[in-house]
């Protein structure tokens, strides 16, 4: 059984419909375009599938290439959900032109991320200080799993060690400071940094740290499972 879905990149593309039509014409496969809410819901299903205790209150962050989804659950039920235009590819192409990035480029990137999270996010506006005390913050997708692999200094990626790994804000800050001073050719030599992610990892790390600052949290749990696993679970019932 083949299941194909399209996410934020195709949602935002001017030729998104034509792209999906071309896929069907060339392969016979109908790719379903997910809404931001569907993408967030499926990511949630995938993330919680690897945690034994998944009935608490969670804030799930799924950082993608074209968007970032935030999902808040209360007693295992979704209470808040949104998709924001904070994708690592988009932000990198829009704001980071130098290698390594210039300080003014980093400043502009941070301002963009904080503005969207602080001014445009319905989730962050609705999370009260009381909610923050109870919420367990979980991150998924390539940025977060790569940061976990770097924190663990993995030379070979091991999903079982990634699942449940606790990333501290100070550890992420240390990795970030190390990365922004290196050109990509040296950055990609850092143990645990997934090949091909040496350019976009900076924008992704800025998103992670901005979310942690706004939540006033120092801990982020990591899930190797996410959207792909959610799509699979949904397809198999």
Image: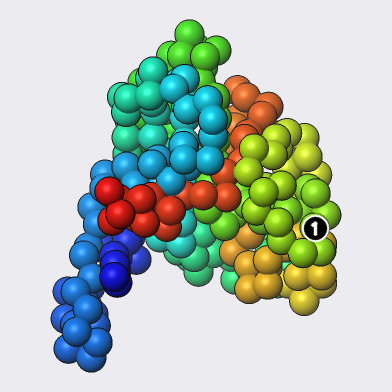
Q: Position of residue 48 (x, y in %)?
A: 46, 37
Q: Is residue 224 above or below residue 221?
A: below
Q: How is the image coloured?
A: rainbow
Residue ID at (57%, 50%): 224
In the image, is 187 to the left or to the right of 235? right
| Residue 176: x %, y % from top left | 74, 50
**Res. 79 visible in picture:** yes
The answer to which of 190 and 214 lies nearer the viewer is 190
Q: Quick check: 181 left or right of 219?
A: right
Indicate the quadrant containing the N terminus: top left, top right, bottom left or bottom right: bottom left
Residue extending farthest bottom: 26
The answer to whether any part of residue 214 appears in the image is no
Of residue 107 and residue 37, the one placed in the foreground of this image is 37
Q: Residue at x 78, y 40 (%)?
A: 171
Q: For the residue carrying disc 1, how many other residues have a C-alpha within 10 Å: few (<14), some (14-19), or many (20+)?
A: some
Kindly identify which residue carries mark 1: 154
Mark 1 secondary-structure assignment: loop
Residue 236: quarter of image = bottom left
Residue 206: image location, x then y, percent: 60, 47
């Amino acid at each position: 059984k083949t299941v194909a879905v399209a996410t934020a990149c195709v949602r935002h593309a001017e030729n998104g419909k034509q792209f999906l039509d071309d896929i069907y014409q060339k392969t016979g496969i109908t790719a379903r375009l997910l809404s931001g809410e569907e993408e967030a819901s499926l990511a949630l299903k995938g993330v919680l599938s690897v945690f034994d205790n998944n009935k608490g209150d969670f804030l799930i962050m799924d950082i993608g290439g074209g968007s970032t989804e935030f999902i808040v659950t209360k007693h295992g039920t979704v209470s808040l959900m949104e998709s924001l235009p904070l994708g690592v590819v988009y932000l990198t192409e829009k704001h980071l032109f130098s290698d390594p990035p210039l300080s003014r480029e980093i400043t502009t990137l941070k301002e963009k991320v904080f503005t969207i999270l602080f001014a445009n996010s319905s989730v962050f506006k609705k999370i009260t200080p009381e909610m923050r005390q109870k919420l367990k913050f979980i991150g998924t997708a390539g940025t977060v799993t790569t940061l976990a692999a770097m924190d663990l200094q993995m030379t070979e990626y091991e999903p079982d060690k990634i699942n449940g790994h606790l990333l501290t804000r100070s550890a992420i800050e240390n990795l970030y400071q190390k990365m922004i001073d290196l050109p990509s050719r040296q950055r990609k030599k850092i143990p645990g940094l997934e090949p091909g992610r040496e350019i976009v990892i900076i924008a992704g790390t800025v998103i992670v740290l901005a979310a942690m600052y706004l939540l006033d949290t120092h801990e982020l749990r990591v899930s190797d499972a996410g959207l792909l696993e959610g799509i699979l679970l949904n397809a198999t019932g």
